[in-house]
Amino acid sequence: MNELALLVAATLSAGTPLAIAGLGLLLNERAGVLNLGAEGMLLISAVAGFAAAYHGGSEWLGFAAGAAAGAAVAAVFGWLVVWLNTNQYATGLAVSLFGSGFSAFVGIDYVGRQLGEKTAHAVPVLADVPFLGPALFRQHPMVYVAVALVAAAAFFLYRTRAGLVLRAVGESPQSAHALGYGVRRIRLAAVVTGGALCGVAGAFLSVVYTPLWVEGMVAGRGWIALALTVFATWRPGRILLGAYLFGGVTMLQLHLQAQGVQMPSQFMAMLPYVATVVVLVLISRNPLWIRLNMPASLGKPFFPGA
Amino acid sequence: MSAPRLELRHITKRYGDVVANDDVGLAVAPGEIHAILGENGAGKSTLMKVVYGAVAPDAGELLWDGAPAAIQSPHDARALGIAMVFQHFSLFDSLTVAENVWLGLSRTVSLREVVEGIRGKAAEYGLDLDPDRPVHVLSVGERQRVEIVRALLANPRLLILDEPTAVLTPQAAEKLFETLRKLAATGCSILYISHKLHEILALCHQCTVLRGGRVVASCDPTRESTASLSRMMIGAEPPRLERRPANVGPLALSARGLALPGHDRFGVALEDVSLDVHAGEIVGIAGVSGNGQQELLAALSGEDPRADAGAIQLFGQPIGRMGAAARRKRGLHFVPEERLGRGAVPSLSLANNMLLTRHEALRAFGWIDRAALRHQASGVLRRYWVKASGPAAAARSLSGGNLQKYIVGRELDAVPKVLVVAQPTWGVDVGAAAQIRAELVALRDAGCAVLVVSEELEELFALADRLHVIAKGRLSPSIGSAEASVEQIGEWMSGLWTGGPGQAAALAGGAR
C-alpha cells in the first residue's frame, strides 16, 4: 500500500517535465510549427536552470532562467523557420544537436556540484490523509503548476478567441493571412511561449527531479515530449494523461528492477516509444479524429503574399 | 451628388511580365450594385484583392468617401467597412462554421452572439446553415454560404462578391439577389464580380467591363442586352450550343438500390439510389449542394468502394467494389468537383498531372516518356484553350476556370466510354463554358454515356437529355429535360416528388 503510494508519487514527479514540455510543443504545433529541437532546448534550459539555482540559491530562479533560456533558443529557431522559412525538420534537428553539444560545453563546471538541501513539500492537512497524502499531496509545487498549466492551455485553445486564432493559423495560414491575421507574428509568439515551457521543464529536471547536472541528462525526454503531442492528438488534457502514463512506465521499470524482476532495462526503456506507436496505430484508424485535431499546416512553411 | 463610396484611379498591378491590372479606374456610389464583368484572367480577382488590401498595387490610388485611403491589409479594409466573399474560400476546415465566422469579425462579439447572428442572418436570407458543423464536411455550396453569412454579419459598407452564384440553385441565387437588393437599399455598396450576363442584367446598376486587365467599357446594364455585354466582354457573340436529339444506345452505367451509410455523423447517407445512363445520352443530376452529390460521385467514381458489388454496374459488370483506377481501365472516367486536391495535385506541373488519370506516356517498367507527356499536355492546353505558360506550369498557378478546362480536357481527351462529371463549368467563363458543354455534347454524339452532376439548373437543362434530382440522399425518378420545368425541378430539389423524402415528411406532417 505504502509502496503503491510512493510509486504514484514518483509517477507524478516523473510525468511533470514531460507534461510541461509536451504542452509547450503542443502550442508550437497548434500554430503549425514542428520543433524537433525539443531535446536540445531541454538540455540548454536544464543547464541554465541548474546554474541559476546554484548561484542564486533558489529553485524559482532556476525555473525563470530555464524559461528564459528555452525562450531564447526557441526565438532563434522561430526566426529561422518562420521568418527565413528554413526547413522545420532540418532546423529542429540542428537545434537538438547544437543543444546537446552546447549544454555539455557550458555545463562542464557544474558537473558533480550539489544544490542546497532539498526541502520537503507538503500540502497542509491533505498531506496527512492516509495513502492519498503520500501519493498526491507531498509533491513539489511545480507538479501542481503543471496541472494548472494544462487546464489553462485547454481553456486558452478552446474557449478564447486568441486560442481560436492560433488554431486557425495552424490549420490554414493562407486563410488566416487573407483575413488579416499576422501569421508570422502569431507563429513566433507560439514558438517562443512553447520554448519557455520547455525551458521550465528542463529546469525542473536539473533543479528538482535529479537534482544535478550531468551531460545529456535529459535522456530522450524531449523526444518523448514530441511523441506525446501526437499521442495526445494535440489535445492538452491528453498530454497530461500521456505524460503520467510514460512517467509511470519509467517508474515501474525502476520499481521492478528494485524488486529483482528479471527483465532487460533496455526493454523497459523502449516501452514509452512502443506505447506511442501502438496509440498512433489506434488513433489512425479513425481518420476523422486526426483530421479534426491535427493542425493541417504542421511543418509547412508559410510565405505571405505568395 | 455625394462623393462615391469607393473610387479607383489608375490602378496598375504586374505579376512578373503579366499585367493583371492596367490603369484601371472606377467609381461606386453608396447603395450601388456595381458589376465587374470579365472573362477568366481579365484581372477581376486581382482588382478586388487590391480593394480588399490583400494585394498592394504597383501604381494608382484609392479613394474612400472621397478621401485618399491607404488600404495595406485586409484589416485596414475591414476597419473601413469593406467585406469580401472569396471565390477560393478562406475557411478553416477543422473549425466549426461559427468559429470560422467569428474569426472574420471584430473582437468585441462573443462566440454565442456569433451563433445567434448566424442563425438570424441564415433565416433572414434563407441560407440553410448549421453553425455547429465543422467546415470540412460541408459541400462547396455550403462553404460559400459560410462566406456570405460571415460578410453579412460584419454589417459592411462595401461588400465584394466574387462569383457568388457559381454554386447556387436558381431559387437560392434569386434569394441572394433579394438579399443584395435589400442590402443595397440600406446604403451598402456592392461590387459584384461575375461573368454571368443575365445576373448582371437582373441585379446591377452599373457595370465595368474588363478585358486583358484594362477597362474596355463602363455602362448601365439596364440599357444593355446579354449580347451587347458579351461583345464588350469577349469581343464576340457567345457561341450557341448546337444539339441534335440523342441517339440512345445500350445501357452503360447503372445503379440499382445503391445504399451507403454516411461517412460520419455529418455525412449524407445514400438511400436506394437507382439510375441508368445509356451510351449516347447525357443524364443530369440536379440538387442543392450537400444533398448527397459528393457521396454519390464518390460511389460512382470508385473513390468510395464500399457499395455492394452489384449495386453499380458498368456494361453489365458489377463494379461497386472496384477502385477508381480499375473503373477507369474499363472506360469510366471522372471529373471531380474539387479541382485542386481531387482533380489535380496543386504543386505538380500540368504535364505531371496528366499522369494521374492518363498513362499513354508511360513506357515499360513505369518509365515516363517526358517528351510524349509534354506533347500530350500541350495538346490538351491547345485544344481546350487553357491559358497557362505551358505544360511545366504548376496546377495551382492556373486560375480556377483554366484549371477546370484542363481537367475536363484531360478526361475528354481520353475518349471515355462513360464520363461522370461534377460541376463541369464551375467558375469557367462564358466562352469556355460553352466550349466545354459543346465538347460534352460531341462526346455524347460519339456514343459516350455522360452523367453530369451540377448545381446550375440552366446548364443541366441545356445539356441533359434526362434529369434526376437528388435530395437528402435519395434520387428522384428521371424526367425528360424537354418535359421538365424549372418550377418542377425546384420542387423536387426540396424532396417533393412522389415517394421523395420531402413528400414523405409533408405527408407525415399532414397526418398529424
Image: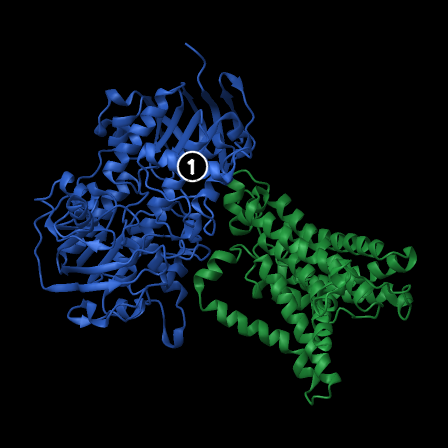
Residue A179 position, x and y percent, is 51, 39
Q: Nearer the viewer, residue A219 or B10?
A: A219
Q: Could you tell whether B316 is left or right of B302 in the image?
A: left
Per the image, label 1 sits on a secondary structure element best described as: helix
Res B70 quadrant in image = top right
Residue A282 position, x and y percent, is 49, 71
User: Which colour scheme appears in the figure?
Assistant: by chain
Q: Residue furthest top?
A: B1
Residue B286 position, x and y percent, is 21, 48
Residue under label 1: B116
**Circle 1 marks a residue in which chain?**
B
Q: Nearer the viewer, residue B390 or B494?
A: B494
Please tell me whether residue B48 is drawn above or below residue B244 in the rendered image.
Answer: above
| Residue B212 visible in rendering | no
Please tell me whether residue A93 is drawn above or below residue B26 in the rendered image.
Answer: below
Identified at 33% across, 63% down, the residue is: B357
Task: Count the marks.
Answer: 1
Q: Could you tell whether B451 is left or right of A72 in the image?
A: left
Identified at 45% across, 42% down, the residue is: B98
Res B277 quadrant in image = bottom left
Residue B25 position, x and y percent, is 43, 23
Q: Residue furthest bottom?
A: A262
Q: Could you tell whether B69 is left or right of B221 in the image?
A: right
Res B150 quadrant in image = top left
Which quarter shows the N terminus of chain A?
bottom right
Q: Residues within 10 Å of mark 1 (few under 14, many from 20)?
A: few
Q: Amino acid at mark 1?
A: Glu
| Residue B19 visible in rendering | yes
Q: Colour of chain B?
A: blue
**Chain drawn green, letter?**
A
Please tell me whether residue A194 is drawn above or below residue A36 in the rendered image.
Answer: above
